[in-house]
Image (cartoon, coloured by chain):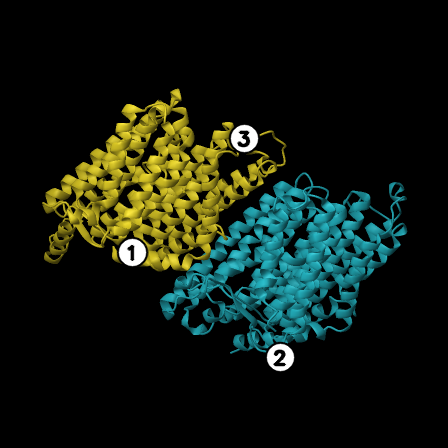
Chain colours: A yellow, B cyan
């Protein structure tokens, strides 16, 4: 029991609150709907607080659940994201008062399975958690009233099913090779087989590619990025923010664990991943500059940002891993800040097109400045954390050998194109056309998140040194 | 001198820019302008104090200061720190920048009719970025300020220019971003190669060039060319010059003064700081090419200048052409040429800003900049004509005016230089002498067409300069005459620095 407490406490608290939300949905469905938000916030805060009681390097459930410094880092990031996203869900639960408790139980279960997937030490636990995370995403996506939404999000469901099948195929091939599910045991097998010279290189690479398709799909990387814009357009706004935060954080955490086992044995895989990253960056940025819908633009933005992180990850040194961790940290704030600005815009005046933004500077200067700061952070320009993060990740790539230099150049080109995509939003806001848009200033929670994120992106840039050292420590513990 | 802190000098304009942008700040144009002028004046005096207490005999950087956050230096684990320091060249550029900003603010009253708060905050943001470029001791800090300077320039061009200004601003931004990519890529590979060779992760400019033997030649050439492209776009230099005349002809008059006075010097400074100091060997290798390139720039841009229909374009191409002297002087690799080149870049900034001040007065009164629509204005604006005469003579290179000494020094330096390919260099230097005649051609064409030919009917009621414009132009003309008569007062400030740079190159 004590080991469960030592390793599993945050998840356990989240489970309790999921059960509470589900039970509450039976009894007070339409009235007291506001309670659901505060209960969920309480759950997330308690789960965050409980991480203080965790002990490092503990296993639970018969050595299938690992809790260490590395998983803790990601869990805290996910819980922070969950905290912000709960606050952003205000209008979502207002529109569907009868579903508020159900919404938050699914919402929390997504967070729960993201955390479980991070702690998994074998492929079975990993697969189950990832599927459950996917299921929560499907459920959340289906909550939109818009009649087109079902059609738009259907692609996500179908592709998700296909890549799950691919993952299982790859997994069965790996199992056929090693007769093991456990990460460490597979690693040992690979070391032994390399020493004895009997390593099935082609099969290994092939099965790894099959498995990685799941992550490419969830992160919106090429060639599985086709679902992104449609699904985001069909999703409600908070769900869009959710989809671009929680799965991204979880998938990078897991992907680096999987790559750690395999990547030393297949050099081809590094090149394949670098190709994927670069193609994603170029394709995503070129598509992003043509978008008129803010949600579609943010979808491509997520795709490009994941591409940059994958480029950092595929090099796979401790240094590059720490750079990816730092980038994720910055991405969390910048992305949620941008989404909260967009949500604020939609909730107050139902604005969702780029041209609707014209002339906002005259009505809400603070809002525009904060939105500009988070966009600059996403674009990776100077006085924000985005610059430091991009510098760090590119330097990690440049440091790891001349083979990756061509990829680096193309990626930087893509980033410049992406800067233009973000610049279009900023330019639209600064247009001198007079409009009569009124942004609702009563939504305190969204404003709080927007200003908080804008401030923290600048603050992270200033104290970046300490955070980088922390990320290096975390990467070392992995 | 404890009260002289470079951090205050650099970051005070940013703070003022934020104060002006702050929505509670009164949106009343007189109040905003008065506040901006007072600040710019005090800031200029503060910058002058740096010059007053500067030790000209000191070799190396002075006024060194590090920006720390809660006692920690910035990004120490990546070898990047927020350190600022100036040497003689940088200090001159800093003082010049603050002076030009002051001039710009004096000339802004009549031309800026809308969005005052945005305008003044952007001017100060640009000032801060430019000062940061000159003072940064760290490569990436330099780059951050370099990028930061693009944002205010974009707004300054697009928001207050004519109807085509937005397009020109986008062109400038795209060209600069493309050039910055080269720059950033060069910096990254330099940073990592240095780490791989010396095992010290650092982006400090001084420690990158400490031991120049450690890099192989191909690597140095790659990085050198990256830096060269990045800086030559900003200078601007002939294959990359297109944006400058475009931007200048479409933006508002005070913005012209600002851009010609402060923006181009950053490119020259980058050439000296990176291409000459970090890669002396390669600079020596490239020097004959650069010298011929510089001369070609003088001739080509000068020829373009003569055929332009607008006075702003004529003066911008004249500016581009004069920047060719800077490159020629740097490529001489002797102290005469180098000192002349640095002096030339400062003289260019002063003289061409002064020319743009003249243009702004003319444009304000006639509402046109087409040379065919202007003529004989000297009869109704005699004061303006006499000021313009002094400035135009200075731009040609008449003795005892500011641009005479640097041109003479550059061409003497080119003649005396002992580079390889002696014949080519000597021929180039001789052609450079001829180029002075070209410059006389376009400047006097400009002067004659605007001020001297037959007075057109519609300009007969044009009024002469206002007291404020007279004051600004007198200040500029005094500077031009003073440094024309007594050039050593500028040269002695950076003489020791130039001797260090040249010592390294001639090893």
* Residue A425, horizontal then vertical, whole percent: 52, 38
Q: Secondary structure at mark 1?
A: helix
Residue under numbered circle 2: B57
Residue B203 falls in which quadrant of the image? bottom left
| Discs 1 and 3 lie in a common subunit | yes
Q: Residue furthest top?
A: A147
In this picture, residue A213 sits left or right of residue B313 = left
> Would you call the spot at circle 2 few (<14 residues within 10 Å), some (14-19), or many (20 or more)?
few
Image mark for residue A475: 1
Instruction: Depth check: give the residue in front, A274 or A456.
Output: A456
Q: Secondary structure at mark 3?
A: helix
Question: For the residues carrying marks 3 and 2, which lies nearer the camera in this image?
Answer: 3
The quadrant of the picture occupied by the C terminus of chain A is bottom left
Residue at (46% x, 37% y) in the render = A446
In this picture, residue A212 sits left or right of residue A30 = left
**Do residues under tags 2 and 1 come within 8 Å of each other at their CB atoms?**
no
Q: Secondary structure at mark 2?
A: loop
Image mark for residue A356: 3
Whether residue A247 appears in this view of the structure is no
* Residue B173, horizontal then vertical, whole percent: 57, 47
Measured Cα–Cα span from mark 3 to mark 2: 60 Å
Marked residue nearer the N-terminal end (1 or 3) = 3
Measured Cα–Cα span from mark 2 to mark 1: 50 Å
């Amino acid at each position: 029991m004590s080991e469960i407490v030592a390793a599993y406490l945050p998840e356990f608290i989240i489970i309790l609150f999921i059960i509470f939300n589900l039970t509450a949905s039976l009894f007070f469905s339409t009235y007291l709907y506001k309670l659901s938000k505060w209960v969920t916030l309480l759950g997330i805060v308690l789960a965050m607080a409980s991480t203080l009681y965790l002990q490092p390097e503990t296993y639970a459930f018969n050595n299938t659940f690992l809790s260490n410094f590395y998983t803790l880092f990601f869990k805290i990031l996910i819980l922070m994201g969950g905290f912000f996203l709960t606050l952003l869900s205000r209008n979502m639960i207002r529109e569907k008062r009868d579903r508020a408790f159900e919404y938050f139980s699914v919402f929390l279960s997504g967070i729960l399975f993201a955390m479980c997937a991070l702690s998994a030490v074998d492929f079975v636990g990993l697969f189950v958690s990832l599927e459950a995370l996917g299921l929560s995403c499907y459920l959340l996506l289906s909550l939109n009233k818009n009649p087109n939404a079902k059609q738009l999000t259907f692609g996500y469901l179908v592709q998700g099913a296909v890549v799950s099948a691919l993952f299982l195929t790859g997994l069965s091939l790996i199992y056929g090779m090693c007769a093991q599910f456990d990460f460490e045991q597979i690693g040992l097998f690979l070391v032994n087989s390399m020493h004895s010279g009997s390593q099935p290189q082609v099969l290994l690479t092939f099965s790894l590619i099959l498995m990685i398709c799941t992550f490419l799909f969830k992160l919106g990387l090429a060639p599985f990025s086709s679902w992104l814009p449609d699904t985001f357009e069909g999703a409600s706004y908070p769900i869009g923010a959710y989809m671009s935060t929680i799965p991204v954080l979880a998938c990078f955490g897991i992907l680096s664990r999987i790559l750690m086992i395999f990547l030393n044995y297949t050099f081809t895989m590094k090149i394949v991943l670098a190709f994927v990253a670069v193609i994603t960056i170029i394709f995503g940025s070129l598509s992003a500059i043509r978008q008129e819908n803010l949600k579609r633009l943010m979808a491509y933005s997520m795709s490009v940002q994941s591409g940059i992180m994958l480029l950092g990850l595929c090099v796979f040194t401790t240094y590059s891993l720490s750079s990816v961790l730092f980038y994720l940290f910055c991405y969390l704030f910048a992305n949620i800040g941008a989404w909260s600005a967009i949500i604020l815009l939609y909730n107050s005046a139902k604005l969702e097109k780029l041209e609707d933004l014209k002339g906002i500077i005259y009505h809400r200067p603070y809002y525009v400045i904060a939105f500009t700061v988070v966009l600059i952070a996403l674009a990776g320009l100077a006085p924000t954390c985005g610059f430091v993060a991009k510098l760090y990740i590119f330097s990690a790539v440049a440091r790891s050998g001349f083979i990756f230099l061509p990829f680096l150049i193309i990626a930087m080109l893509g980033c410049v194109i992406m800067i233009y995509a973000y610049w279009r939003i900023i330019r639209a806001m600064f247009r001198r056309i007079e409009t009569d848009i009124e942004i609702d200033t009563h939504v305190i929670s969204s404003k709080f998140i927007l200003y908080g994120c804008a401030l923290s992106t600048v603050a992270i840039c200033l104290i970046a040194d300490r955070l980088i050292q922390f990320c290096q420590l975390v990467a070392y513990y992995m | 001198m404890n009260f002289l802190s470079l951090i205050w000098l650099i970051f005070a304009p940013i703070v003022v820019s934020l104060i002006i942008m702050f929505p509670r700040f009164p949106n009343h144009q007189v109040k905003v302008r008065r506040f901006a002028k007072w600040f710019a004046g005090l800031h200029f005096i503060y910058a002058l104090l740096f010059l007053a207490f500067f030790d000209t005999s000191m070799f190396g950087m002075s006024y060194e200061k590090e920006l720390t956050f809660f006692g920690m230096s910035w990004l120490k684990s990546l070898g990047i720190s927020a350190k600022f320091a100036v040497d003689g060249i940088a200090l001159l550029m800093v003082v010049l920048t603050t002076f030009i900003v002051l001039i710009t603010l004096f000339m802004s009253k009549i031309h800026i009719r809308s969005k005052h708060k945005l305008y003044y905050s952007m001017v100060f943001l640009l000032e801060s970025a430019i000062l940061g470029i000159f003072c940064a001791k760290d490569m990436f800090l330099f780059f951050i300020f370099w990028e930061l300077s693009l944002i205010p320039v974009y707004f300054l061009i697009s928001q207050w220019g004519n109807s085509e200004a937005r397009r020109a601003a986008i062109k400038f931004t795209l060209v600069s971003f493309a050039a910055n990519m080269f720059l950033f890529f060069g910096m990254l590979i330099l940073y990592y190669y240095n780490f791989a060779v010396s095992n010290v992760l650092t982006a400090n400019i001084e420690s990158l060039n400490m031991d120049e033997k450690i890099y192989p030649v191909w690597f140095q050439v790659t990085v050198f060319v990256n830096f060269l492209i990045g800086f030559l776009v900003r200078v601007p230099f002939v294959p990359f010059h297109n944006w400058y005349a475009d931007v200048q002809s479409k933006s508002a008059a005070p913005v012209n003064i600002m851009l010609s006075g402060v923006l181009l010097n950053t490119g020259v400074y980058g050439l000296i700081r990176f291409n000459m100091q970090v890669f002396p060997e390669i600079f020596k290798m490239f020097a004959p090419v650069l010298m011929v390139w510089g001369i070609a720039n003088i001739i080509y841009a000068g020829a373009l200048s003569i055929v332009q229909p607008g006075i702003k374009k004529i003066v911008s191409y004249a500016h581009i052409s004069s920047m060719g002297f800077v490159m020629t002087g740097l490529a001489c690799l002797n102290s005469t040429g180098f000192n002349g080149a640095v002096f030339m870049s400062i003289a260019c900034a002063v003289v061409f800003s002064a020319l743009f001040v003249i243009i702004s007065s003319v444009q304000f009164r006639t509402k046109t900049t087409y040379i065919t629509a202007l003529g004989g204005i000297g009869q109704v604006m005699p004061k303006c004509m006499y000021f313009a005469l002094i400035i135009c003579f200075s731009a040609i290179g008449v003795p005892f005016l500011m641009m005479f000494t640097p041109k003479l020094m550059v061409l003497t330096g080119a003649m005396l230089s002992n580079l390889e390919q002696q014949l080519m260099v000597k021929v180039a230097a001789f052609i450079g002498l001829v180029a002075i005649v070209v410059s006389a051609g376009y400047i006097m064409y400009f002067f004659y067409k605007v001020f001297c030919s037959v007075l057109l009917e519609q300009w007969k009621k044009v009024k002469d300069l206002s007291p404020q414009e007279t004051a600004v132009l007198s200040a500029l003309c005094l500077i031009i005459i003073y440094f024309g008569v007594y050039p050593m007062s500028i040269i002695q400030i950076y003489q020791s620095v130039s001797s260090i740079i040249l010592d390294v190159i001639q090893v």
